[in-house]
Image (spheres, helix red, strand yellow):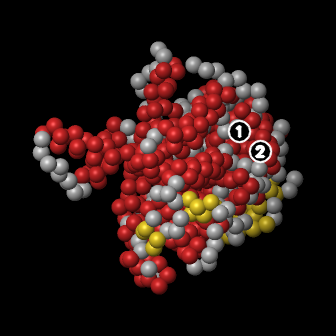
Amino acid sequence: MRTVFKTSYDADINLFRHRAQAGWYALLALLAVLLPWLVNVFWLGEATNMLIWAIAGMGLMVLVGQTGQASLGHAAFLAVGCYANVLYQQKLGLPFILSFPLGGLTAALAGVLVAIPTARLHGLYLAIATLAISILVDDLIVLSAPLTNGVQGLYAPPISIFGLTIDRYGNPYLFYWVVLVVAVLVVLLYRNILRTPLGRAFAAVRDSEVSAKAMGVNVAKAKAVSFGISAGITGLAGALMGHFAGIFNNETFNLLISIQLLLMIVIGGLGSIHGAFFGAIVVAILPQAIALARDAVTGALGVSSIAIPGLETAIFGAILIVFILFEPAGIYGRWVKIRTYFELFPFYRRDMFRRQRSYLRTERMR
Amino acid sequence: MTALLELEEVTLRFGGVTAVDKVSFSVEEGEVFALVGPNGAGKSTLFNLVSRFYDPAEGDIRFRGESILKRAPHEIARLGIARTFQNIELFEQATVLQNLLVGRQRHRRGNLVSEMLFTPFVRAEERRHREAVEKVIDFLDLQAHREQYIAGLPYGVRKVVELGRALAIEPTLLLLDEPASGLSVEETQDVAFWIEDIKTQMGITVLMVEHDMHLVASVCDRVLALADGKMLALGTPREVQGHPRVIEAYIGAHGRSKVMA
């Protein structure tokens, strides 16, 4: 076990707790940068997909994990970010370097607009309201066909940054690096939110609204800001998703995507950046794992390949149920437990992470 | 002495029940003022009125001579009024340190963009907040619990953390809702010393609700007794404790002769 001697407040403010931790993350970053040389094009594409999902996951995590507001409609913000980015390029002729952040900003604005009428809703009611918004955006895309080309969808042009053309198929490693840079920037932004009064205001709203008010937190404003940041990050992921898919329509961002996104961060571990990445790995790897398993089974039985519709969703649901029953803290929670076990060996106690029942709280005033 | 907080003919009704009935009193700057009374007397309701969680049906509440009835609940802390809750309302999924830092929201000076980019100014601000919080940690002897999560803390420590969070606001007026309820004799004694120091060293005015008359008698300058939302008696702890109407409210009219004797 490592003992960190803190000699200044900066030890708690800095991004890394100690040199060794910074070293491990530097190694991970190096590995991520060198990935195009380590794996083939197929798996590089899967890694890119994973990173895009992780960005979207972090977007939703700000809202659900940090601020405690449920959302079943985040596919709507993926759609807004995606359409805005491509339309800014096509209709206004903006370069990617401008259209991409503007797309995120547009999604953030949409998030704030959603937050204003839903500020008073809690839990299930908020989930239903956001669900409705997801459906609404789906319809709006179809209705505004002159702009969005309706159900036929739009083509995402290749990304062009300072004359360099980046195409997912033409030069997949460049596209991967673009996504990697965005992912790292979002992680930094997320960490900064966590270590400032902004992140603490979010946590206050999540844990006790009454108390947050008494501490001087403007709860409605905090929710709106959280919705904005969350939708903005999700919008960026949506824009990347559009470029990754090449072609997209209203169906690309349907309700199932919203639900998958929420399940993803629950499986990964609510309230942590790691959780978004772990969840994204599950989402990205699962279809490939199922395909591999199916090939193995059909190969072993000597029958022709069969495709079972809805298998992926069913397995995903099963994984979720297993997690909620046995590890509500998600993959990240399990990882922390395993790490603590080895750090404290042989002093780890079984109930170390058991949450105590919280004492009576005033639910009367919300 | 000037009045810091003034309540004037404040009335609050929940449906047909009058929870607070024409209550008027003023808390002077620098004093420790206690509200006592049987359960359901309206003590906590008065706190919630000052916190602006409830709107009074009639009357006015003034802080430093200015009505606060036009203010939103979150603006109350910014005015310099901090409070604790009867049934502890801490942020459970956060550490003691983070809880105390939330108290610094009032002193937040960075804006959204600078915080997201974590500019050097924001870092300097964080150091400043931390220093202020460390002073509170030293004052309340919370060093051992700094990095612990609230969800795993015993009741007594949670009580202290809540007091600490209110102090981190650096208030002018501190509202304590039953600071000693559920605490052991030793812990209650600590609370008494702390309230004494909060008053004399920090110069913070304290308004508290408390059932422990021993604590009230030892730290409070003035006491207001309430029953069924009405004012019974106002004066020094000794005067109020001996007031016939107060005795009647607590143990009934028949008890009077026995107590007096």
| Residue B53 x %, y % | 60, 61
Q: Residue at x 64, y 72 (%)?
A: A94
- The CA distance from mark 1 to mark 2 is 8 Å
Circle 1 residue: A13
| Residue B44 x %, y % | 59, 53
Q: Residues within 10 Å of mark 1 (few under 14, many from 20)?
A: some
Q: In the rendered view, does B65 fall on the left or right side of A51?
A: right
- Where A273 sits versus A335, above or below? below
- Where A59 sits versus B154, above or below? below
The answer to whether the residues at label 1 and label 2 have Cβ atoms under 8 Å apart is yes
Q: Spot the residue most to the bottom.
A: A146
| Residue A344 x %, y % | 51, 19
Q: Amino acid at mark 1?
A: Ile
Q: Residue at x 54, y 32 (%)?
A: B153
| Quadrant for the N terminus of chain A in the image | top right
Circle 2 residue: B123
Q: Quadrant of residue A328?
A: top left
Helix, strand or loop for disc 1: helix
